[in-house]
Image (cartoon, helix red, strand yellow):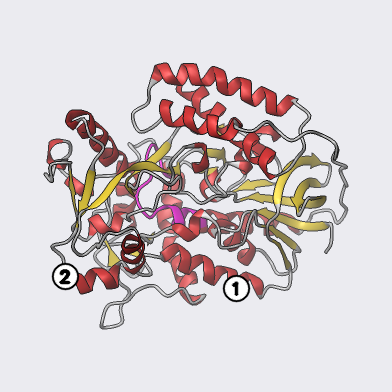
Amino acid sequence: MSRNYDVIIAGSGTAGLYAAINLPPELKILLLSKRELMLCNSALAQGGIAGVYNSPEDNIQLHQNDTMIAGGFKNNTETVHILVSEAAENISNLIDMGIDFDRTPDGKLHRTLEGGHCRHRIFHHKDATGHEIVSKLIDKVRTLPNVDIMENTYLCGIKKTSTGFSADTWRDDQRKSFNCHFMILATGGIGRVYEYTTNSAIATGDGIALAYELGADIKNLSLVQFHPTAFNNKHTRECFLISEAVRGEGAYLLNKNGERFMHNYDDRLELAPRDVVSHAIILESRKMDSSDFYLDISEKDSDFLKKRFPMIYENLLRQGYDLTKDKIPVFPCQHYLMGGINVDSFARTKIDDLYAAGECSHTGVHGNNRLASNSLLEAIVFSKRAAEDIARKAVDHTHEYEDYQFEIDPDAPVIPHGFRTEIRHIMQQSYFVIPDKKAAVEGFERIKEIKRELTSGNYLINPDYIEAKSLATIAYLILKEVI
């Protein structure tokens, strides 16, 4: 493999893969995947991808309005307009690449409804849309001769050079650096900073932490979305998501007494935006002195449910629940990050030639709360715009590469055990759905100590250290905004 590339992309979710596909074929690209390619938050996305595409009963203004309402009108109106306006082109591109969106019996694309949307505009592949999109994008990227792929590769550090960037990587206990003219961070979310999350194991905020160390602007990191209906088995850290689309198809939320309660909190009932529903559940839990809540869609036809939600149905069966008959235990859980590395409408950060796309970025499209199924759309729209901007700039770019030598101390000690567990506990107690200001202030002081220890101490750079330092940085930035 070469050590020099035109573009390095960190992250193999929808944003990273789609950027690689849309970059010019004459550019040499290195795609870094922290674990195997399919292990990413994008692949876990169930509901679908929102967009106005060949939709006579819908229009982009309605999609924009729904996005703004869900975001509390704190959204960036420019990027929201770009998001909804460029949805059709990009959804068409996905279809051309072979993405198998569900269709009606007459062959038309099926659209479902989710909370916060005023129209049926969610394109989906059963209840495993993210898996379908990511797998097909991976197949496409593997055919590209200009793309080298490195799986199970951790990004340890980034240095700005006179010709672009040097990236320090860890793989199989070996450190190696690569150079590039342009870098795209598409490293996903921060869910593993919490005790319970719907996110995959890779979601430790590495790209955000590294961008922060480089001097990029990090904005609104405290805007964390808690999904109201994660499966509540109260045992595993990674909580299986019960898609928004289940409520879109008519599921009711019930309290411990088996009673509907959303009418006491919002006129939109179960189809209110996620933050509203999550808050309602927490308030109801305090009122009832119980965390026992349920999702019930058993009144629907069982064959329809098995066909519409096959993955959810099978996963719940493994947990001892039948979606077609049983009330399913649910409770809010960390799900998504609206803030991140601040970028403009072409995914550019304040650092020349550094881009960020997908969940690790802050485009401003989500405002204070993401509208369901806008995440996959954001990832493809703005990663494509990043690729287009790089294509324009690469024409006149240098063909030289500065090589930065990262320090390596193989005799450095490993970090003490327990930092990540402590960070997760602090965040779960201090900043979950309805924040605890006192706990946040106290937790912030301890987080500062942990961050100082990890950034100033001479520890062996390995995956444990990389993720612990990232989580400490993320927790520090979130609580700093809160207090």
Q: What residue type is disc 2 on?
A: Asp
The magenta region covers 365-379
Asked whether 385 falls inside the magenta stretch, the response is: no
Location of residue 111 by image quarter: bottom left
Q: Main secondary structure of the magenta part?
A: loop
Q: Secondary structure at mark 1?
A: helix
Above or below, 386 against 467 in this view is below
Q: Nearer the viewer, residue 360 or 390?
A: 360
Instruction: Where is residue 240? Give x, y as percent.
Output: 39, 53
> Residue at 66% of width from left, 75% of height from top?
143
- On the question of residue 483 being in view, the answer is no
Residue on which the image places disc 2:
301
In the picture, measured across the screen, residue 33 lies left or right of residue 230, that is: right
Q: What residue type is disc 1 on?
A: Lys
Q: Residues within 10 Å of mark 2 (few under 14, many from 20)?
A: few
Residue on which the image places disc 1:
140
Above or below, 411 against 101 in this view is above
Q: Nearer the viewer, residue 215 or 395?
A: 215
Asked whether 372 falls inside the magenta stretch, the response is: yes
Q: Nearer the viewer, residue 152 or 106?
A: 152
Q: Nearer the viewer, residue 402 or 56?
A: 402
Number of the label disc, if any, that sits on residue 90: none
In the picture, measured across the screen, residue 164 lies left or right of residue 217, that is: right
Q: Secondary structure at mark 2?
A: loop
> Residue at 13% of width from left, 46% of height from top?
258
- On the question of residue 270 being in view, the answer is yes
Location of residue 286 by image quarter: top left
Disc 1 versus disc 2: nearer the observer: 2
Which one is earlier in the sequence, the residue at label 1 or at label 2?
Answer: 1
Instruction: Where is residue 395? Give x, y as percent.
Output: 76, 59
Instruction: Where is residue 94? Give x, y as percent.
Output: 48, 70
In the picture, measured across the screen, residue 478 lies left or right of residue 47, that is: right
